[in-house]
Image: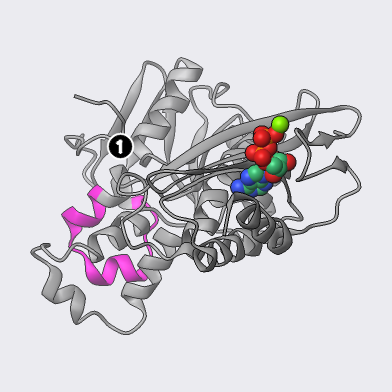
Amino acid sequence: MGEFDLIEIIRARTAQGRDDVHLGIGDDAALLMPPAGHELAVCVDTLVEGVHFPVGTAPEDLGWKALAVNLSDLAAMGATPAWALLALTLPAADARYVERFADGFAQLARAHKLALVGGDTTQGPLGVSVTVLGFVPEGRALRRAGARPGDVVCVTGTLGDAAAGLRCLDRGDPQADRLLNAPPGTREYLLARLNRPTPRVAAGLALRGTASACIDVSDGLLADLGHLCAAGGVGAEIDAATLPMSSALLTLFDDAARLAFALAGGDDYELCFSVPPDRMAHATADLARLGCGVTRIGRIVEGDGVRVRDVRGQTLAPPRRGWEHFAA
Ligand code: ADP
Ligand code: MG
């Protein structure tokens, strides 16, 4: 089993016909034909074992997630995914592992008619780097910049589930006993949110022309909304009581834990966006049509930074900021 056998496993399992792929896996570079009148949206994200995903993560889940986190970035831009590149570093040439990884990747890729057009396969500590490319009509991409004071701040889906799922894997956790006796399905739900995030691609497309700014929540709401605010030269106020939480999160964790997960947990892959109040109903209706939940969580204000208010309107001391590499 050598490098080229592994590449063939990946190629065969991810095959997806697209007319705009003039040359895919197998040459020195892929040849791709973007549609006229569109900009290419391109991003890359790397997942390293023990840093971005726990040791022991199932290969199917890793394949899915490595693609999902990138599709989430395209979603935040309002771009339609088309192509991907996969750089895979493996400790050993394990065919079964690569088959399972490719199956997880392909499951999500197929749902978006996304073609894997190339990559790189190397030996070393387990890590995955996926590059995705998508299209957006020229000038119509969603950006982090653009929020104005008075805009409503919204988030899709629920927050904090993935961080809670990660906590469920922590055997040393003081709440571990309670987690082991969790009602059926709750722990599984949180773990699925950690391992199989659903990128909000359709929601991102629907928000084009409606949202004034958008970002995906990958490092925690506080951190990512903070980026949106910094890009727009504005601040934001969040009402803690309005943060959307799943029933699994509400069942398994106390107030303080779930607030920390929702504000700073990371790995949510929901969209956080601002929208002028007069377009709010429009945004909500469009997302509802897609079956995508959306919650109003606060407002954009003059100034800078993100403040969180409790039910009485008091400002809460922020929990640990979102995930940041190389932070002191
Ligand atoms: P080169 O040496 O010219 O860079 P490689 O031998 O690394 O090419 O790869 C051969 C072909 O297989 C290329 O088309 C490359 O894009 C593709 N490829 C390599 N690894 C992967 C992978 N993990 N996933 C998808 N395509 C891959
Ligand atoms: Mg070459």
Q: 143 or 153, which lies in front?
A: 143
Which segment did they paint magenta? 242-260
- Where is residue 133 shown, x and y percent of the image? 70, 37
Quadrant hosting ligand 2: top right
Residue 210 in view, yes or no: no
- Residue at position x 31%, y 37% in the image: 323
Tell me the quadrant of the picture where the N terminus can be found.
bottom right
Instruction: Give the amino acid type for the residue marked by disc 1 in the picture.
Output: Gly
Q: Please, what is the dominant secondary structure of the magenta stretch?
A: helix
Residue 324 horizontal/vertical position (percent)? 31, 31
* Residue 253 part of the magenta-drawn span: yes
246 relative to 326 in the view: left or right: right
Q: Residue at x 25, y 56 (%)?
A: 258
Q: Position of residue 257 (x, y in %)?
A: 19, 55
Give whichever of 169, 39 is nearer the camera.
Answer: 169
Name the secondary structure under disc 1: loop
At x 31%, y 73%, the residue is 187
Judge the density around disc 1: few (<14), some (14-19), many (≥20) Cα neighbours within 10 Å. many
Quadrant of the rendered structure where residue 238 is?
A: top left
Q: Does 198 sit left or right of 310 as displayed?
A: right
Residue 229 lies in the magenta stretch: no
Judge left or right: residue 128 versus residue 163. right
Relative to 248, say whether 153 is above or below.
above
Q: Is residue 216 above or below residue 147?
A: below
Quadrant of the image for the C terminus? top left
Q: Residue furthest bottom?
A: 184
Name the residue tied to disc 1.
Answer: 322
Q: Residue at horizontal 57%, vertical 50%? A: 67
